[in-house]
Amino acid sequence: MDRKQFIINKKNIGQYLKNQNANLAISEVGRIKEIIKNSGSCFIFKVKIKVNNKRRSVIIKQARDFLKINPSFKLSPKRLEWEYEALKYFALAGNKKVLPEVLWYDDKNYVLALSDVRGDTGKLLKEEIKKGKLHPEIMKDFAELLAEWHLFSYNKNINLSIKSDKRFSKKWPSFLKNESINDFYTIGARKIAVNSIVDELLEESRQSPSAMIWLDPLAKNIFTDKGKFKLIDFETAVNWDIAWDAALFISDWVIELPGANKKTVAEAKKCVSLFLSVYIKKISARLPKTELLAVEKRIYRYLGVFLLHRTNGVDNYKFKKSTYLRIQREALRLLQGLHANDFAKSLITLLSIDNDFIQEEISFKSGKYKLNGILQTPKIKNNKKIPVVIYLHGGTDRGMLGSPAIFEISNILLKQGIAVFRFNFIGTDNSDGLLCDKTWDRFEDNFQQAVNLMKKDSRFSKIGAVGRSFGATVIAANADSQDIEAMVLHNPIFDEWYEFIHLLPEMSKDFMDNPGKKFLILGTEKSEHIKGDYKFNSKIIKQFPMEKWKIMQALPKSNNICVIQAENDPETTPEYAKILYNMARQPKAYHIIKNTTHKFPGKEKEAANITAKWLVACLK
């Protein structure tokens, strides 16, 4: 920063303003108030002045070479000139009356002078929402304005620029995308979800048509007054995915949906529904259908990111524990796009479901490995014992968050008074171990220790189990266990070599040609959620004949088994699933879910309904 920068404060700002006569003929400086609340980046003053015998208030913003709320965080003060350029740009793109008027920009001292859009009667929307005043009357106009801004530069790759400093003009957008988009807003999602889910969403945005977006359309930057609104803070404007702005904006209202006040909840639903319907209708006139559907889905997924940002990230809002858990659970479902086929229709109700439950983080040992999981329990009346269902994920899954269907299954079971325990196998996500540590004997011990944990819990009576892929195989091999009352197998593996040879022919051939190899290499590139090198221990191959033999011994002694198979699964086949079904005793069930693959994409609800119906019938 230039050492000659004049640092303004309440004592010297009057003289500073009078020296700006070239820009504005100020004859008198009156009341000066420093804005502390909701001002994290710059130093902001509200000043009463007299110009041409008329009194008015102005906003004076000064940027320093650090973040106001965190002086150790260094940041170029030229970000204020970026805001100056952004305000000029958005004034061209849409209704400029909603923006502050730029009075002058002092590039020597990094000061931006603006008209005071709040005035004496304007209300900060963030404070209004806290009071239960949600202002549905502004939603239509704001939706139309945001759509106009987005369509003005849609798919044109327009970037703002500061002519005097082209280097900063390149660095600032990069900072916004890396620090704000990739890191700051996603911390909460990365803590509770798996990084690769977030990274896939961000990569999809990078590959999609973009536009100049606000990036910060939060209620803390919006004033409302007599049915109108005014907007502030545009230093973060950047070329990015339009779904971001729409999702971040409605997050302030979606966060109100789980509330206890019925009037507030009804108002929140109205606001969200009105905004989405108007915004989508407006952009649909310009976007091809495929792009529109993709934007809708990303709005949902980004909404999940922003809800997790509020419950588990940097912006920690204060919620009741039951509300916090409900928001967190539904945010994970949104992040994985589970509501994208019911756009707007289900969103306005999903967070207001009256489904109270207790969520606990559970850790337990399996051999030398510590495994981590989540136990969700519906509220139990009169200390009555209830059933519990254990969920086992697939071998290379993202773990207990990796199968979207489990969120649907949990929802139904919790409503039916059945607890759900899901955990990460060895070598998965936050459990100990690496991918190459996975073997069938360790999978089985993981499962057995989870069963023992639920048996010892005095709250639970019968135990059920749901498994997907490798997890379904583990359950099938232990189907004769006296501890398991009911089982559901999703796409179980019955012939491991079929899966490997079919999916990885070159790797499998190399492994078979060299039987002394310790590892089966699964690929040179791996997803972020894979722990360690992308390879299986050779034991997982050598042990499978024994696992298959155990299945053939256990299933004929077992009943209450439901097998659910995806019709077009490239990893397992309906033929093998039917073999497993035929081995089991009655009562049993077999279902083919058509037009879907290994994780039932697009058919999660169908798989969940069949699963939950079977478990409820067997366990209650």
Image: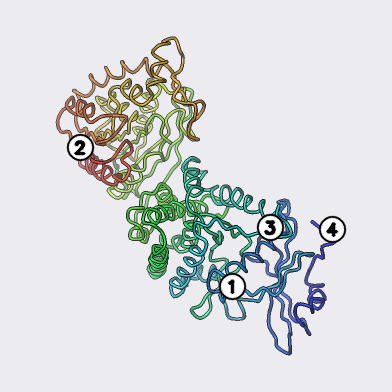
Q: Residue at 61% x, 76% y: name it.
A: 117
Q: Spatial distance from mark 2 to mark 4, Cα to Cα?
A: 73 Å
Q: Residues within 10 Å of mark 3 (few under 14, many from 20)?
A: some
Q: Spatial distance from mark 2 to mark 1, Cα to Cα?
A: 58 Å
Which amino acid does the dot numbered 2 rest on? His
Indicate whether 530 appears above or below 357. Answer: above
Residue 315, percent across and down?
A: 56, 55
Q: Nearer the viewer, residue 258 or 364?
A: 258
- Disc 1 is placed on an element classified as loop
User: Is 404 left or right of 29, judged from the image as shown?
Assistant: left
Residue labelled with disc 4: 3
Q: Residue furthest bottom?
A: 53
- Disc 4 is placed on an element classified as loop
Indicate whether 469 appears above or below 241. Answer: above
Q: Earlier in the sequence, mark 4 or mark 1?
A: 4
Residue 118, label in figure: none
User: Is 148 left or right of 575, judged from the image as shown?
Assistant: right
Q: Are marks 3 and 2 in contact (CB under 8 Å)?
A: no
Residue labelled with disc 1: 99
Q: Earlier in the sequence, mark 3 or mark 1?
A: 3
Q: Spatial distance from mark 4 to mark 1, Cα to Cα?
A: 32 Å
